[in-house]
Image (cartoon, rainbow, N blue to C red):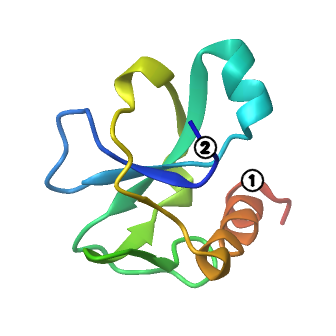
Amino acid sequence: MAQFDIYPNPGTKQAAIPYLVAVQNDHITSRTGACVVIPLRANAQPVEIMAPLVEVSGVGAFVLSADEIFAIDVARLRNPVGCLSVADRAKIRPAIDKVIGEY
């Protein structure tokens, strides 16, 4: 399992959230058996910084829903469909900082 890989959502909300992107580093994931992911929402409106658009290669653009970050058992994440581009990876930290930062 690689950081920034994109997986089909194994949950029940696949229409609204078709993909999950792994954001936890491999070092931690290999030791815990869980991975922190951010949902990629279809048909959602992007929000500046907190919920930017990212591209799933060959599929299209989705909203990185940083305010819905969670951990999932790695056994549930199967068959990655791609990996975030370097440009889209750069959107993750500012999005998470916006969600958990001080105001």
Q: x%, y% of residue 4?
A: 59, 55
Q: x%, y% of residue 41?
A: 32, 63
At label 2, the amino acid type is: Ala
Q: Nearer the viewer, residue 72 or 51?
A: 72
Q: Residue at x 86, y 60 (%)?
A: 102
Q: Which dot marks residue 55?
A: none
Q: Quadrant of the N terminus?
A: top right
To which residue does mark 2 refer?
2
Q: Nearer the viewer, residue 5 or 102?
A: 5
To which residue does mark 1 refer?
100
Q: Which of the 4 image quarters holds residue 45?
A: bottom left
Nearer to us: label 2 or label 1: 2
Q: Residue at x 69, y 21 (%)?
A: 30
Q: x%, y% of residue 29?
A: 67, 26
Q: Secondary structure at mark 1?
A: helix
- In the image, residue 20 sits, relative to residue 46, either above or below, namely above
